[in-house]
Image (cartoon, rainbow, N blue to C red):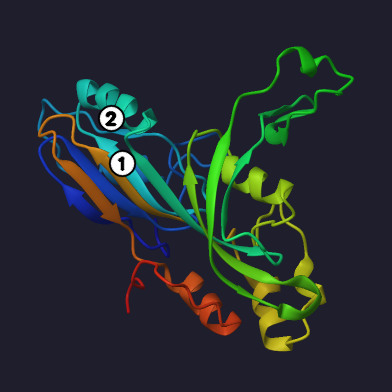
Amino acid sequence: MSGMARPEVLLEDDHLLVLDKPAGMVVHPSYKNKTGTLLDALQARDWPAETRPSIVGRLDKLTSGIVVVAKSAAMHAALQRHLASGASEKTYLAIVYGRVSEERGTIDLRLRHDPKDRRIIVVHDINAPDGAAASGGRVSATEFERLSSVEAPDAGLSLLRCRLVTGRRHQIRVHLAARGWPIVGDPQYGEPRWSRVVDPALAAALEQFPRQALHAWRVAFDHPVTRQRVTIEAPLPRDLAELMELARLKPRATATTAGA
């Protein structure tokens, strides 16, 4: 993993591990990314014989922030149940194009795979001619809160806090784009609205931002063993913090900046 930031440990006990994954790191090995993954970093640690680290859930390569790791198969199953329940919380921060007028709300749009490319997620269309209407898509809901917004003439920029009600693949990215608020730098679902920004320094920063401006910021759940409430926040990465400062997005409350 030469040249790439390493994941930071936010919490560890005998049963689980919570990490802060840097943007650009793949979670699981694939045919395109066989080494240098988060799982590789985990397996490089010195683990007792009775433990078997396994990652709970998923996080896109270009998204930074919290990843939960179980230290046994039993803990993995328990964490999956807890994190999928309504008693847990997983919250993200996103910088998006657009002037978000609502202070808060819920995006409730069914999602499904694009029949032409299953790597892409689309909003379910009941009038789709490809037979997908019968499946109905998967129920998907994202709660959002506007933390800050600026004019950025002809484009608009907003900082949103998003809470997953369901945890579908690419859910936040697709839901926000569907509402007309694509995430800055999103290579799949984004738009080049930086070209409309009058401020040349801000326009250049938006154009050159190297990844989707999305950060898995906070997780809260009941510990499967101790039954105590666990609440963890991942510091805001420097790239997002610098973009927020340049855009003059001043949130009411976010995480502290990593490395500050």
Q: Is residue 95 left or right of residue 128?
A: left
- Measured in 3D between alpha carbons, the distance from the residue under mark 2 to the one under mark 1, in whole angstroms, is 9 Å
Observer-nearest of 4 and 122: 122
Horizontally, residue 38 falls left or right of residue 45, namely right
Q: Is residue 155 above or below residue 186?
A: below
Which of the two residues, 142 or 41, is positioned nearer the viewer here?
A: 142
- Among all residues in the image, which is located at the extreme bottom? 200
Query: Counting residues from the N terminus, which is met first, the one under dot 2 or under dot 1?
Result: 1
In contact (CB < 8 Å): disc 2 and disc 1: yes
Q: Amino acid at mark 1?
A: Val
Q: Which marked residue is nearer to the observer: mark 2 or mark 1?
A: 2
Q: Residue at x 15, y 34 (%)?
A: 15
Residue 246, label in figure: none
Q: Residue at x 31, y 41 (%)?
A: 68
In the drawing, does residue 178 fall left or right of residue 241? right
Provide residue 132's location: percent of width, then percent of height: 78, 18
Q: In this view of the protein, can residue 39 be seen by the observer?
A: yes
Q: Quadrant of the N terminus?
A: bottom left
* SS type, badge 2: helix
What's the residue at 66%, 71% (across, down)? Answer: 157
Residue 251 percent location from the top left of the image? 47, 73
Q: Which residue is found at the position 32% from the left and 79% from the top?
A: 260
11 to 192, vertically: above or below: above
Which residue, given by chain and number where applicable, does mark 2 sit on?
Answer: 79
Residue 83: image quadrant is: top left
Crowding around mark 1 (Cα neighbors within 10 Å: few <14, some 14 to 19, many 20+) is: many
Corner quadrant of residue 28: top left
Q: Which mark is residue 68?
A: 1
Other-residue count near label 2 (Cα within 10 Å), few / some / many at <14 / 14–19 / ≥20:
many
